[in-house]
Amino acid sequence: MSRSKVQALEPTGALGAGVRPATVIAVRDLAPAVREVALEVPDWPEHRAGQYVDVRWGTGPDALVRSYSIADAVLTDPNARTCRVELVIQLPADGAAPRANDLASAAPGTRVHVDGPKGERLTWAPGETGDRPLFLVAGGTGLVPLMSVLRAWARAERQGAVRLVHSVRSSAGLLFTEDLAALERSKPFELATVTTREAAPGSPRPAAGRLGALDLELFGWPPALVPECFVCGPPGFVDAVTRMLVQMGHSAACIRTERVVPLDA
């Protein structure tokens, strides 16, 4: 399964039977090359935190279908099952404008079609892990589906504690800073940011560098607590973190992973 940098799980090229019309209702930039697009989707089905949707914009040979992680999905009209679905998109790294019919170039009022929600590998629902803690480890835009998990946890009651580690190249790549601060005020959790190419001011981490086993020990949970671990990011990041968690004594059965792969990879 592949994701396009922040977004995609399985670029399918076609939409299935559960297609729904949707309208772009808001757009905001989360970082210099990362954009959030909010859709209003009617007749939204039940979903699990950590899932994704396929989105089609356009018709005929110019139509573009891509898959995007859901950062949040909240019912705004329970009677009509109308839902605000927030997706996150990676912009071209070279600063070029997104191609036509790419959701990154959509403005409020744009009409698209949505198929989903889909995916089970990185999902979570309240109650399924009991009082066990959650350990969320994100590399770059791999934070997006984990934000959905974190928000679902924050809305639930009597869940285990959460620790989140977000690894980015520099502070310019941080995502959801205001959202995370608001969540922490409403339901406290522990957040650690690891910058790999610069030393983070005030961080207990001594220097820049890739996320390592010492970071996972410092910011994570001990294996004796049997935390449920969620790891999302580039393939090399996910493989390395998973390997370190297992070497630390975490059960592989308690580690859920998703690899983020560029569309052109």
Image (cartoon, rainbow, N blue to C red):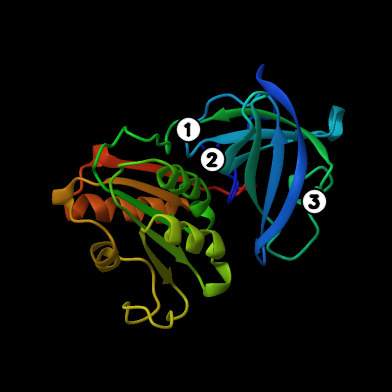
Query: Of callouts 3 and 2, which one flags the residue occurring earlier in the amino acid sequence?
Result: 2
Please name whichever residue, 75 or 115, is drawn nearer the observer in this view of the structure: 75
Reading the image, the residue beneath label 1 is 48
Residue at 58%, 24% (x, y): give it.
45
Please name whichever residue, 244 or 159, is drawn nearer the observer in this view of the structure: 159
Give the vertical position of 172 relative to 96 (above or below): below
Question: Does the residue at mark 2 contact the one at mark 1 (Cβ under 8 Å)?
Answer: no
Residue at 69%, 61% (x, y): give it.
29
| Mark 1 closeness class: few <14, some 14–19, many ≥20 residues within 10 Å | many
Q: Which mark is residue 28?
A: none
Please name whichever residue, 184 or 36, is drawn nearer the observer in this view of the structure: 184
Where residue 48 sits: x, y (%)?
A: 47, 32
**Of tags 2 and 1, which is closer to the observer?**
1
Reading the image, the residue beneath label 2 is 2
Reading the image, the residue beneath label 3 is 105
Query: Of callouts 2 and 1, which one flags the residue occurring earlier in the amino acid sequence?
Result: 2
Amino acid type for the residue under numbered disc 3:
Ser
Counting the numbered discs, the total is 3
